Image (spheres, helix red, strand yellow):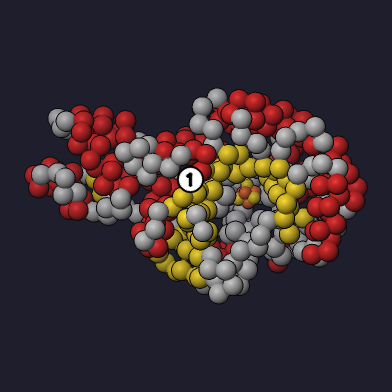
Amino acid sequence: MINLCDFTLEELTEYFKNLGEASFRAKQVFSFIAKGCESIDDLTCLSKALREKLKCECEIFLPKVERKLVSKIDGTIKYLLTLSDGNIIETVAMKYHHGISVCVSSQVGCAMGCTFCASTLGGRVRNLTPGEITGQIIRVGKDLGERVSNIVVMGIGEPFDNYENLIKFLKNINNPEGVNLGYRHITVSTCGIVPKIIDFANQGMSVNLAVSLHAPTDEYRKAIMPIAKKYSLNELLDACRYYFNKTGRRITYEYALIEGKNSSDECARLLIELFKNDNCHINLIPVNDVKERGNVRVSKKRVEEFKNMLTRSHVTATVRRELGSDISASCGQLRNSAIEQ
Ligand code: SF4
């Protein structure tokens, strides 16, 4: 079955054209889907005859809510969503005064093997389709009855390992006929697939880019992130500077502090050397314990010391606010526990 959510507006227009229908039909359907329509029968903008025709080969599928956990501490909501083939993904919604921010998954599992991450423990099962990524936004918006105002592609999966579908998803979300969310309200996070960062810079989208850095040298980085064996830190930073120059969007470098691995004074000094001349932002993350990985969380005091070393040297750094700490730990752990059950 074709999931109509997977089409870009251009593809949908082409599809309707091939059915002998006017192009405005595609716009109507695209807009109905963005508003949360979940079945061909609900496409009341179309004639009954056309709906029956569509039903022979199409469906509208949005991920279904399998479980929903709401944090008593800060209201963060974690969704376990089921896809049409039974696979499970995680989506997180955070409420802010300016609206809802949603963190979406881009793959079922992940092939990248970062040692501090639970999402990669079972490897990559498959890529999400554009409609399955968009569907997470639409599902959360429907469930909460509010418009999603920010999106971060930082859930399960490496978005640039599913590049084509990521680009389609971004175009669909941005399309004024659809969800109509500006690119500046979207952040894509990558572990550092260099050629894709360059290509992404050339897309002209001005999406915010977050890069999982997590170490200040190749040697340190290779010990915790297999992608570092493929692309050196120099290559990665050159690509990031290219992205900044091309889009004007300041890069955020994610740095998960892990006890005994990358949280020493020496690491902070090396980080300062790397970024003292860059207009960028370091986001320090006190890493969650992942029991399967043997990672130990650094103390709050150490996080503050590390941050202060950076900021005293004029490298902009903040500590990521911990959200939903009572409803499960790091990304991927909720899905893993559901699979284990
Ligand atoms: S941190 Fe991101 S890229 Fe690395 S294994 Fe986890 S999901 Fe994959």
Q: Is residue 168 left or right of residue 252?
A: left
How far across and down, in percent of the image, does residue 259 sit? Answer: 82, 60
Crowding near pointer 1: few (<14 within 10 Å), some, many (20+)? Answer: many
Dot 1 lies on which element?
strand
Q: Is residue 105 visible?
A: no
Tag 1: residue type? Asn
Q: Is residue 258 left or right of residue 246?
A: right
How far across and down, in percent of the image, does residue 252 sit? Answer: 67, 42
| Disc 1: which residue | 127
- Picture layout, residue 159 above or below residue 329: above
Q: Is residue 236 left or right of residue 173?
A: right
Residue in the picture at 86% in, 47% down: 312
Tell which residue pokes out farthest to the right in this image.
Answer: 266
- Picture layout, residue 112 above or below residue 290: above
Foreground of the two, 88 or 233: 233
Residue in the picture at 88% in, 53% down: 264
Tell which residue pokes out farthest to the front in this image.
Answer: 97
Foreground of the two, 145 or 156: 145
Determine which quarter of the picture holds residue 212: top right
How far across and down, in percent of the image, does residue 143 sit? Answer: 38, 63
Residue in the picture at 60% in, 44% down: 189
